[in-house]
Image: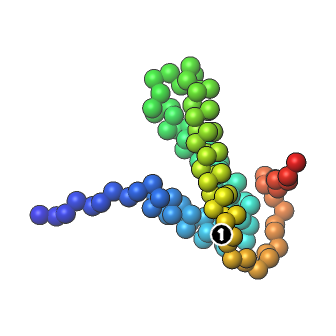
Amino acid sequence: MSEAKPELTMYQIADQFIALANQLSQQENDIGKVGTAMRFASARFNAFEASIKSADLAAEKDHALAWFSDEFKAMLKENLEDHIANPPVAAPQQEQKSDDSVQMFKGA
């Protein structure tokens, strides 16, 4: 009898996405482009998830937008705080390619 394959946790799945993002960042030599692509992919997949889970997406669109936005903001805040407390080892500065789709954020 074969054993059931254990389910991956959310964190294990996220680690797989991060590993791919790291690989693409090295390949493209552009972390901003990869980050933008990940945000777009997340938005696209989350819209798909909402459409599958909703009986009336048009009526529930604002609620879905608020829910996903709040979830992302909480996760981003937690990870920003982690990077403040545990800064990553600085990689050598790479020349960034010009990419109009990527906008640098600036503090207000």
Mark 1: give few (<14), some (14-19) or many (20+) Cα within 10 Å: few
- In the image, 38 versus 69, the foreground residue is 69
Give the total of numbered labels. Answer: 1
Render colour scheme? rainbow
In the rendered structure, the answer to whether residue 92 lies left or right of residue 63 reads: right
- In the image, 101 versus 16, the foreground residue is 16
The percent coordinates of residue 45 (x first, y second) are 54, 44
Residue extending furthest left?
A: 1
Q: The disc labelled 1 sits on which kind of residue? A: Asn
- In the image, 20 versus 69, the foreground residue is 69
The percent coordinates of residue 61 (x first, y second) are 59, 26
The percent coordinates of residue 48 (x first, y second) are 52, 38
The percent coordinates of residue 84 (x first, y second) are 70, 64
The N terminus appears in which quarter of the rendering? Answer: bottom left
Q: Residue at 84% of width from left, 62% of height from top?
A: 98
Q: Secondary structure at mark 1?
A: loop
Q: Residue at 51% of width from left, 63% of height from top?
A: 15
Residue extending furthest bottom?
A: 92
Q: Which residue is mark 1?
A: 86
